[in-house]
Image (cartoon, rainbow, N blue to C red):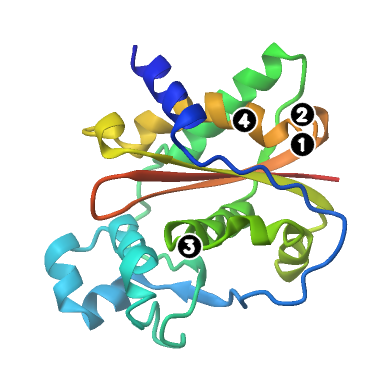
Amino acid sequence: MLKKKLIKAVASLGAAVMIVAGAGSVTTLTSFAAEFDPVYYAATYPDVAAAFGNDAQALLNHYLTYGQKEGRKPSANAAAGEAVTSVKTTTTTTTPAATTTYHDLAAAQLSSLRAASGLGAVTHDKNLDSIATNIMNTYMAGGDVNALSNALTTLFAQYGLSYNVGGFTCCQLPAAYVAGLSYDQLAPVIMQAAYPQSTSVLGASGVSAFGCHFAKDAAGNTYFVFVVAGR
């Protein structure tokens, strides 16, 4: 029941967008150059730390949803309100235990979907996660993601990636559909609906890598961006 309900939500309630890059060019793009430092962000903005503690994902979500528009700085060397490409990790004296992330769960579901169609596995590319985060930034702010129609190849070049074609799906799930569910629980279910949409034009056989990003707004609505790329 949960899977059917969420898949239906992705298909009908989330403003799904399919973009294929390759033709044309974009001359105006935001320069995505900053790194998000959750330790700096929490220390610099005690009001945020009081609400989210040292939860790096929650701090990042706050910056993408509110902090950037408020002119806060994502890290010490970044400009106020600058978009981010990655999240700084802090070193510790002990090696933390390996954890399963929602990216891993999405990858497992993606591999299962591709295997059912006789296709091979794809690579999870963290650079595509960063691109997904920046698309999310535009999407959650109410920007026109359709304006990115030909931007992916330019973004690939900015990240030093050799992909020359790609696509993405954006979706929004109302709080009522996702209340009490973690990103880990949502990732495999949403992937089941997002993958066919994201490859319908690019072609599943041409996909060689993927990335994704989740975020929530203050009302509890969940946003998901899934990026695929190939050559």
The circle drawn on residue 137 is 3
Give x and y (percent) for residue 161: 77, 60
The circle drawn on residue 204 is 2
Give x and y (percent) for residue 163: 81, 53
- Asked whether the residues under the numbered discs 2 and 1 touch, taking CB atoms below 8 Å apart as contact, a structural biologist would say yes
Q: Give the CA separation, mark 2 to mark 1.
A: 5 Å
The amino acid type found where label 1 is placed reads: Val
Give x and y (percent) for residue 205: 82, 28
Mark 3 residue element: helix
Q: Nearer the viewer, residue 140 or 181?
A: 140
Q: Residue furthest left?
A: 50
Viewer-side label of 2, 3: 3
Residue in the image at 56% along x and 58% along y = 135
Residue in the image at 43% along x and 38% along y = 102
Task: Work out whether mark 2 precedes mark 3 in sequence or the reverse, and give the earlier one.
Answer: 3
Q: Nearer the viewer, residue 79 or 55?
A: 79
Q: Give the CA separation, mark 1 to mark 4.
A: 11 Å
Image quadrant assignment for residue 206: top right
* Residue under label 4: 195
Label 4 Cα crowd, 10 Å radius (few <14 / some 14-19 / many 20+) = many
Q: Give the CA separation, mark 3 to mark 4.
A: 21 Å
* Residue under label 1: 207
Instruction: Tell whether 7 sits left or right of 144.
Output: left
The amino acid type found where label 2 is placed reads: Ala
Image quadrant assignment for residue 3: top left
The amino acid type found where label 3 is placed reads: Asn
Q: Is residue 92 visible?
A: no
Q: Give the CA separation, mark 4 to mark 2.
A: 9 Å
